[in-house]
Amino acid sequence: MSEQTYEEWRATRHLRPGFEQDQEQSSEEMFQEIVSYYINLNRKRRKITQKQIAEALHISQPGVCQMLKRPATIAKLWRLAVAMGGQLEVNIRFGDKVYSLLNEPLDEETEEK
């Protein structure tokens, strides 16, 4: 049996059972890590402790630690943002139009009829 080159593996990897699921899980894990990194970076920059967040949310500090490790649900992100004195904004952009999903309409938004 000959050893497969990288180019051969790359060309045929999508044929492997479960490839799409592995790709999806890998993307989700990367997204979780990125969101967790930026949430914690902003928390540290604002000098907010996990204990302070726990008190604001009426949960335990270990519960906050878990939230900060995997925060990427809208509900968790919203709770963390509010607990740190912020506001979560979730927008969808279509070309030059921006639509807010959680807050008041953005200045650029115009109501379409």
Image (spheres, rainbow, N blue to C red):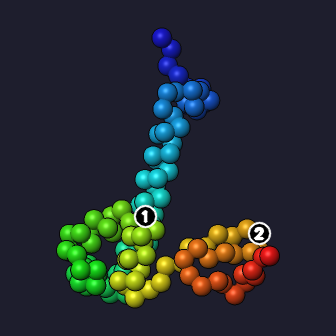
Which residue in the rendered view is the most extreme toward the right? 113
For the point 44% across and 86% down, the residue is 86
Q: Is residue 37 visible?
A: no
The answer for how far apart the CA atoms under marks 1 and 2 are is 25 Å
Q: How many marks?
A: 2
Callout 1: SS? loop
Label located before the other in sequence (1 or 2): 1
Amino acid type at circle 2 is: Gly
Name the amino acid, label 1.
Ala
Instruction: Give the secondary structure at mark 2.
Output: loop
Residue on which the image places disc 2: 95
The answer, for residue 81, to whether it is visible in the render is: yes
When asked about the image quadrant of residue 97, the answer is bottom right
Q: Which percent across, then down, holds residue 50?
A: 26, 78
* Residue holding disc 1: 72
Q: Position of residue 10 (x, y in %)?
A: 58, 32
Front-most of 84 and 9?
84
Residue found 51% across the figure and 34% down from its top: 19
Q: Alpha-carbon neighbours of circle 2 within 10 Å: few (<14), some, or many (≥20)?
A: few
Number of the label disc, if any, that sits on residue 91: none
Q: Height in image: 36 above or below 52?
A: above
Instruction: State the quadrant of the C terminus.
Output: bottom right
Where is 26 relative to 3, above or below? below
Q: Nearer the viewer, residue 3 or 25?
A: 25
Q: Residue at position x 38%, y 77% from top?
A: 79
Q: What is the quadrant of residue 40 in the picture?
A: bottom left
Q: Residue at x 45, y 46 (%)?
A: 25
Q: Is residue 80 left or right of residue 53?
A: right
